[in-house]
Amino acid sequence: MKNTKRIILNSIRCPDGTILISHSVHDYKEHKDRNNLVYMVDGGHDYLRRNTHNHAPYEELSIYDDAPFEIIRDNYYRGTWDKEGNRIWIKMSEMTDSHLKNCIIYNIDRGLEANCFSNELYQKEIEYRKKNKITIQDTIQEGIQDDKN
């Protein structure tokens, strides 16, 4: 088995300051910078794909699993939906306690418990919160039930 670093955040900063993030494997994002060049990211957690401009380079912002956990927790995102049904991305460090637990259950229910990298991170976040006495409770939202397990 190959021992490679896992991508936590796939991101660049364009010369005009715009930050592009690719959250999932085919999440292609591009931006036409004020220098009239197109910058792009793709690959999510699976691979880094970029275009390059040697005379106007971008800044690489990607983070890997060998970073300190305090950095990982603020840069690992989970896709979810807001109250209006829009797809949003939330940092693991901002997920509610029940959301973390429900994500683990969701992955297990789909047979992803063996070698599930996201579950490893969610479990580390739960342990980090216990150690640092951090609690993030759900707010009452219409149509969303809190899992009490």
Image (tube, rainbow, N blue to C red):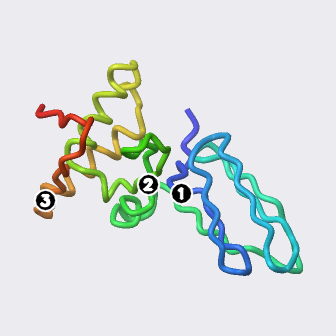
Q: Residue at x 42, y 44 (%)?
A: 84
The residue tagged 3 is: 131
Q: Badge 3: few (under 14), some or many (20 or more) residues near its Cα, within 10 Å?
A: few
Query: Which amino acid type is shown beneath numbered disc 1?
Result: Leu
Question: Mark 2, residues whose alpha carbon is within 10 Å: few (<14), some, or many (≥20)?
Answer: many
Q: Position of residue 30 (x, y in %)?
A: 75, 59
* Residue at x 65% of width, y 45% of height: 27
Q: Secondary structure at mark 1?
A: strand
**Dot placed on the residue nearer the N-terminal end, 1 or 3:** 1
Left or right of 53? Residue 139 is left
Q: Are marks 1 and 3 in contact (CB under 8 Å)?
A: no
Disc 1: which residue: 9
Q: Position of residue 82 (x, y in %)?
A: 39, 46
Number of numbered discs on residues? 3
Q: Disc 1 and disc 2: Cα gap in Å?
A: 6 Å
Residue type pointed to by label 2: Tyr
Q: Nearer the viewer, residue 133 or 89?
A: 89
Residue 21 position by quadrant: bottom right
Up the image or down, 90 lies above or below 145; here it is: below
Q: Are marks 1 and 2 in contact (CB under 8 Å)?
A: yes
- Asked if 54 appears above or below 81 in the picture, the reply is below
Pointer 2 with pointer 3, Cβ within 8 A: no
